[in-house]
Amino acid sequence: RAQLGECLKTIILDDYPEQWPSLLHWIKCNLQLQDQQVFAALYVLRVLSRKYEFKSDDERTPLHLIVEDTFPLLLNIFNKLIQIVNPSIEVAVLIKLICKIFWSSIYLDIPEKLLDPNIFSAWMVLYLNLLERPVPLEGQPSDPDLRKSWGWWKIKKWTVHILNRLYTRFGDLKLRKAESKAFAQMFQKSFAGKILVLHLQLLGVLRTGGYLPDRIINLILQYLICSISKNSTYQLLQPQLDILLFEIIFPLMCFNDNDQKLWTEDPHEYVRKGYDIIEDLYSPRTAAMDFVSELVRKHGKGNLQKLIHFIVEIFRRYDEAPIELKPYRQKDGALLAIGTLCDKLKQSEPYKSELERMLVQHVLPEFSSPVGHLRAKVTPLFLFT
């Protein structure tokens, strides 16, 4: 199948639509059949839609016809799949293909057919359903590397990915042309808040040690970062900020079991990953740092003070605890938080005048720490401050 898929991709890139005009009709016919024919049609449609994912406006004309002809059928299939009770992993494969087709079709611009509020809302109802419903427990791999690639978690990732794209590219009034503002207003009014609430519910599992793949955490935090600058969504976020900051965001910034494993096995790789730009794009920790940075930039009053008090309390507990009970991992997270906030601290009183004393008292001693990852943490912190 993989080899045939590559062959198909090459043929479509070269021959569609001029040399293969009947392909779209074949897809439409097979989407109305059963099982394997539907899978084949979705697979081909995924390859076809991806051809136009990065195309400029003048090269996207064939995509508009593809969407016009196939999306009503896709929506019908999607709706039927969502309603299946106790769905199999094969259902997840079909839904994932639909998600990928939708993603490619809206990546650079929203096709005209989807600008119809009724049609767009019908799609959004299904995506919100996917976002809200729990991932099935039965069949989940126990191995974390296999689990994050499991079909139902992949669907959750693609759902969050699509909603993020719609919000950040098409749902911001400041970013859109005049003719697109109607869509942005509709998205902000009807969907942005609902998505935010569901994202916060998803993140909530982290408070009790629940599982959420790193990529999904990263994407959700990206959505929350964009929500900070918009009054309507920030008002929804504000009542949850303390829980979000101190029970979800800060733990993501702390040294964890995966860090310990890598530090023990390959400390050089641990340090290298800390400076890897590609790693940063998908890292929950980097997204947590970006959230803190954006929060104090846009709404520093009150929030900065709360963060500093929280960090100072960690430093106090660390200093007072005996060596065997010191919260080394929390100290690591607190140092990272200081590094994240340092630009703001250097500009704001009373923190500006206290920054040097804080560094001398709580950062400088860690150069001689018996804990290696703390020594690694303080070196760049001194360079940045």
Image: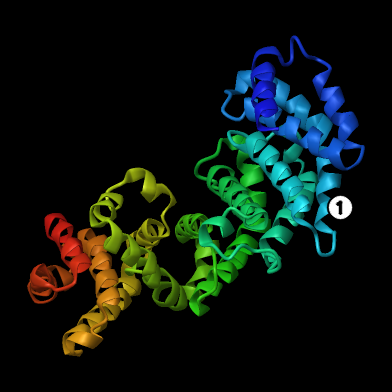
Q: Where is residue 208 in the image (x, y as percent from the top left)?
A: 52, 79
Q: Is residue 316 visible?
A: no
Above/below status of 313 relative to 279: below
Q: Which amino acid does label 1 sit on?
A: Lys
Q: Where is residue 345 in the image (x, y as percent from the top left)?
A: 20, 65
Residue 28 location, quadrant:
top right
Q: Which color scheme is applied? A: rainbow
* Residue occupying image coordinates x 47% and y 56%: 218
Looking at the rendered image, the quarter that the N terminus falls into is top right
Label 1 SS: helix
Q: Where is residue 290 in the image (x, y as percent from the top left)?
A: 37, 57
In terms of depth relative to the viewer, which is nearer, 291 or 176? 291
* Residue occupying image coordinates x 70% and y 13%: 15
Residue most extreme to the front: 265
Above/below status of 207 relative to 192: below
Above/below status of 184 relative to 338: above
Q: Position of residue 182 (x, y in %)?
A: 66, 44
Decide: few, some or many residues near mark 1? Use Cα within 10 Å; few <14, some 14-19, many ≥20.
few
Position of 311 with respect to 346 (left or right) is: right
Q: Can residue 138 be seen in this view?
A: yes
Position of 291 with respect to 100 (left or right) is: left
Looking at the rendered image, the quarter that the C terminus falls into is bottom left
Name the residue beneath numbered marker 1. 80
Residue most extreme to the top: 19
Looking at the rendered structure, the number of numbered marks drawn on it comes to 1
In terms of depth relative to the viewer, which is nearer, 105 or 169? 105
* Residue occupying image coordinates x 72% and y 16%: 16
